[in-house]
Amino acid sequence: MPQKVEHTVHILEGKATLSLRKTSPVWQVRYKVGSKWLRTTTKEEDLDKAKSKAVHLVTNAWFRQENNLPTVSKRFKTIANLAIKRMEDELANERGKATYNSYINALKKYHIPHFKNHNIDNVDYAALQRFASWRAREMTKTPSTSTQNTHNAALKRVFDEAVLRGYITTVQVPQLENKGGASSERRPDIQIDEYPALLRAMRAYIKDGRAGHERDMRLLLRDYVLILANTGIRQGTEMINMKWRDISLTKSGDKEYLTMRINGKSQKWRQIQVRHRVARYLERIKDRNESLKKLTLRELLAKGLDKPVIDATHNADLTTAFGRMFTRMMEKAELLVDTHTGKKRTLYSLRHFYATHELTKGNVTAYQLAEHMGTSIAMLQQHYGHLDLLKLADKFAGEGSVSSALLDNTASKDEDD
């Protein structure tokens, strides 16, 4: 039976106070650290045990304060939910990354269930090793390198939140490892010799569309696909969010290049030079827009308009709409399944097509390609300095010029290639 005592007891020469709440038999301790008064539970009903626990809590807090360490610990679950809320808010305000959804799912499915009763400052290297073993049992396999990267990125969001709120310091953040399980499987792509079949499939898809909105969407999808295949940028946020002001004509020496300013996956802008033929696809998009068609492409780009290149006037969720249309088109043309991977192709396959094509041609190094596509290759970045991509514009743009692509009388603007 707990001792019957007065409801307030002073300890540590009056520097801390134990008290009982009317609604709980557990002793609370109130103490001062620096200029702040703090309160926490001893989790003890017995007064002697509560005193011992309180002395430990208070003296430990004083020690941490003297050594510039956070004096308050918070549960992992609490911090993780704060990190999730921050990501959800950023997504709602269109400032977040698409990968935030994967981070949120990882935290809810794995990290919070495992670490929920840990204080954030107790999630150290040993705890992470135990988590890795538990996760492998939950998944019934060792997660792939890609999955572990996602989980680590999600966990880093939690540690960043804890540091921001003063619950841990940067030196307390453990190193996050990726020992890799099965390597991420190769994404389905489109082979070089299949590209002509893709062009034919798009022509047929447009021809079969009903006049009006359906045909307009199919024409827009064709140019969307061709821009992705000839730039390597990401479908979705990178292409859908691109404005006319993000495209310009850039000179290097006596040559002119089509330059795109891309808002990348990690909210980091990059500027790239793309194949000259992309100018034709942009011009077709312009010509189908009543408010823009009177301008030449050169005049339009000079204006720097804050209007989307891919206009979503008739369909708010173009990413989803284009994805479904692409799937139906590829299925009808019997091109949907990649024979090398056995997987269904998506619009993202065009990015993989671009990367494979550039590396196969051997015009650029893997590092240069990573810079162009906004992909991190840590090992290469350790050995190479900063790259001025404009000096490599010829390698990405190919032969000819923007002007020749626009004025080429030997090819119709309606041709795909």
Image: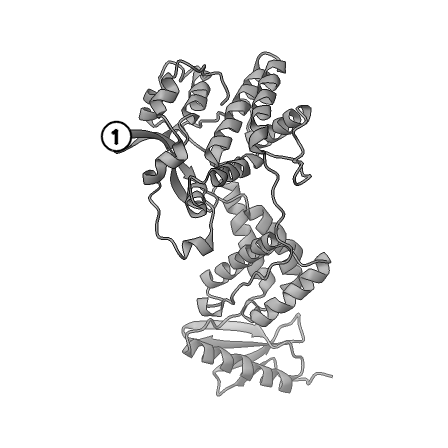
Question: Does residue 53 lie above or below 266 as drawn?
Answer: below
Residue 302 is at least partly visible in this image: yes
The location of residue 170, given as percent across then percent down, is: 45, 66
Q: In percent of the image, x 48 and y 44: which residue is there?
A: 265
Quarter that holds the N terminus: bottom right
Identified at 48% across, 88% down, the residue is 13
Residue 87 in the image: state x and y as whole percent: 53, 49
Helix, strand or loop for disc 1: loop
Q: Is residue 233 left or right of residue 124?
A: left
Farthest-out residue, top: 211
Residue 16 at x, y = what percent?
Answer: 51, 81
Q: Residue at x 52, y 39 (%)?
A: 356
Image vertical order of residue 217 relative to residue 169, above or below: above
Q: Residue at x 40, y 35 (%)?
A: 396
Tell me where residue 191 sits by quadrant: top right
Q: Nearer the viewer, residue 65 or 330?
A: 330
Residue receiving disc 1: 254
Q: Is residue 337 left or right of residue 239?
A: right
Q: Vertical placement of 47 versus 144: above or below?
A: below
Amino acid type for the residue under numbered disc 1: Asp
